[in-house]
Image (cartoon, helix red, strand yellow):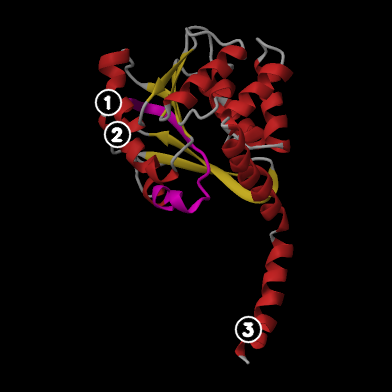
Amino acid sequence: MWLPALAAILVPVCTTLAICYRRRIVWFYLHQFLGRLRSCLTGISREERAFRYVLTNSTHGKPESVLSTLDEWCGRYECVTSTGPEKGKILDSMVQPVAPLRALELGTYCGYAAIRIARLLPPGSKLYTVERDPKTADLAEGMMLMAGLKHTQFQVISGPPAEAIPRFKPAYGVEAFDFVFLSQGRGEYLRELRLLVEAGLLVEGSVILADGVTEPGAAGFLRSVRSDPRYGSTFHRSSAPYQEDVPDGMEELTFLKEGGLRN
């Protein structure tokens, strides 16, 4: 008796949800389910598939060509960046006025955002980008070299950010970062920011841009930095990569002098 009644309630609800979220369901099917299935059947990771596509379809030595080819792959097949073109323009607008001498990215993944940052750095500047997975770090380095960037312009560091951050001064001779991009592990943003402050790697005027802060894992980070007098903060609204109907956003922080006040 109760099964027909339950079905009469659930079927309309499920149908409504499927209609409302059909684009997200299709996105998940195309970019997650099918991608994992391909990886299982071929033994080739989706990151490697993206690399091969860029290798055969972009103009080597041209950052814009590599980026547009990555955008094409991510939009049509499998998304291998949390940034994308819309948020990429926000990232560009942060990097250009800062003109950082030393820039840091925590979360390289396939190198999309790293290429965007490094291509805008002034002569003599350098980007340090940290990727947890050694295989992905090697692939990202190859992607950056394919874009025409040189090792004098960037360095990919393999390992957890929590291990890499304390080593920047003693091992790499970095005094401070003018620009920092937080792009992976939303739940780790606050910890990474604290480690940067403790290591003395932020100075007055350092700009920090945190990606994907509308995700649940970033809620604690936002509450903390927005109430911390050491930071000035601005929220930049956008959509998720290659999904115009899915809201997203980035948080821009400016490090003020210790104990400073907001303007």
Region rendered in magenta: 201-222
Give the residue number, with chain letter if any, for mark 2: 195
Query: Which residue is at the front of the view, 19 or 261?
Result: 19
Give the residue number, with chain letter if any, for mark 1: 166
Q: Is residue 18 left or right of residue 233?
A: right
Q: Secondary structure at mark 2?
A: helix
Q: Is residue 252 above or below residue 123?
A: below
Q: Identify the amino acid type marked 2.
A: Leu
**Relative image position of residue 95 (x, y in whole percent):** 54, 24
Q: Is residue 220 magenta?
A: yes
Which of the 4 image quadrants contains residue 189?
Answer: top left
Q: Residue at x 35, y 27 (%)?
A: 202
Q: Which mark is residue 6?
A: 3
Q: Is residue 198 above or below residue 178?
A: below
Disc 1 to disc 2, how far (Cα)? 7 Å
Q: Is residue 241 above or below residue 180?
A: below
